[in-house]
Image (cartoon, helix red, strand yellow):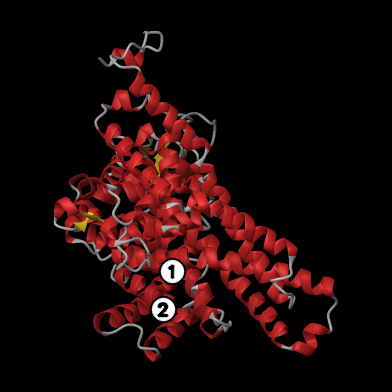
Amino acid sequence: GGSRYENATTPYNPKNSFIPLCFFFCSRSLALTVVPGGSRYENIARNVYHTHRTIRQQNGDLRSDPRFNRLLQIQYAKEIVMMSPAYITDVFRYYNMVAGIFLTMEKDQLKTMPEHIVDDLCSVLVYASSFCAKLLSGADFGNLFRLTVKLLSKDYAQLVRNYNLRAKLGDVLHDIFLPGNSESHSEVPDSVTCDPLAGGQPYLTSDKLSKETLAPSLLLLYGEVENTGFYEKNDHRTKIAALLKFLWDSPEHKPAFKRITENKKSFATFANGIVNEMNDKFASVMETLPAIRTVQLQMANPQEWRALSEEERETITSRHENNEREVQRALPLCNSVMKMLGFLNTDKDIRDMFLLPDMCPRLANMLLHVLTKLVGSRGLGLKVENPESYNFRPKEMLQDLCVVFSSFAAADEFQIECARSGYYTPDLMNKSVKTCRKLALLKGESMELFALLATKVEDASKIMIGDEDLYRDAPEEFLDPLMQEFMTDPVELPTSGNIVDRKTITQHLLNDETDPFNRKKLSIDDVVPAKELKEKMKLWLDDAKAKRAAGDQS
């Protein structure tokens, strides 16, 4: 029974010890051979590529370069094992069998299994999708798909607490099971992504558990990968966004998307992940692209380039390659995030979540920030050679951005938060509307809504300027002690007795689940509305506005 797995001191006496021994010995041997072998092969392939590129840039001879030829020898030697059809196919069959065994286990039993086995099967599949996708053809991965979806689901998420491993599970869904005819190009055969027992339909749209749980699981995962590496999280989130787009376009997943707003905490983590990513990445990209363009022009001028010393050329080239890698990592994510905001917010319930007091200000700030970089800083006119290699499509991004603006245009709270934003200026919005019309980025009702938004925000801005004059004379108790701003929804923190604005404490708790005044454990569910203070603030504000109106009339 279950007690066997709960009590580590209970003797383990299986009916047949030989089979379990074979299982664990085999799993361990693969962990020491094929799994690190995949990582080593990837490193060698990367070194071959960069060495090849460097020699070409220096006008060297590839055939006579000893280091390059030595790297090729190592690569070819490793391919004998790591691309052996018989060996790799047997590895696939073994891990699919392992997944089948894990699927039969109860939760208490499953949590006793070594976590590295799940990590290993993910590593092998991700390696195969990148370097030997053809060997996947004909293999059965049904159990691996179902185990991946199960471990990501809400009921089983606690079994895999390692954020890097959870991110790997998402990578497997993208690299192996996302159909190749989706926006994400894939060389994985259709026979792998589709379930033969479901009439050849993709696992993603035919599996019962996937249809029930995968959409909310991926939204949660999008927020969780914030805890992985600085560069790795970009790749993870780009893949998750591609999966979400595929699921969104699949009618089978519509009911699950309807339910994602039920878990407000998970949705807030996801939504804030989107905002943080765009704020961090897009500004960096738009600052780095001009530097890339400068070096491209410099290299294109042979006389100017040869006039530099070899050391100077190497320094400039190294910095240039780093800039290229940074942009190539960040821009696919920025593009996918903007598209994701567009399609998600066609759903009213999801749009309402983004309009909540703790989320709407951050969303408006982020959107206007991006708009400033694209329109206000002449981002549309920025030129680089081979822009597709960087995924740099400024007009397409502006179109996606304007679609998002138009979806929120009718919401009063969004208009007000745009007016409050430090990025807002009437010129920015009016110029954006003119640009949108000139390039025909929006049509019909969407264009009308975007133009209306510019007018509404300008009106709201004029009102806001007047209100800010009133707030300057507000009593100290009406101001948020952390932000020193007039509160809109004051709440009391029961752990310290302090009163702060709800949006301030909500944002704080996303990163640190403690009371900011005494570091005691705190969740957003614990805070108590400060009703008396809110009523007192309303009376004061109404009186101040009445006095201002009387003064204007006199």
Nearest to N terminus: mark 1 or mark 2? 1
The residue positioned 30% from the left and 70% from the top of the image is 407
Q: Are marks 1 and 2 in contact (CB under 8 Å)?
A: yes
Near-viewer residue (23 or 241): 23
| Residue type indicated by callout 2 | Glu
What SS does tag 1 mark? helix
Across and down, in percent, residue 220 comes to: 36, 47
| Relative height, residue 391 to residue 10 (above, below) | below
The residue positioned 43% from the left and 53% from the top of the image is 128
Across and down, in percent, residue 370 comes to: 49, 70
What SS does tag 2 mark? helix
| Relative height, residue 288 to residue 471 (above, below) | below
Residue 251: assigned label? none
Across and down, in percent, residue 184 comes to: 37, 66
- Furthest residue to the top? 10
Near-viewer residue (80 or 6): 80
Residue 335: assigned label? 1
Near-viewer residue (322 or 413): 322
Name the residue tied to disc 2: 396
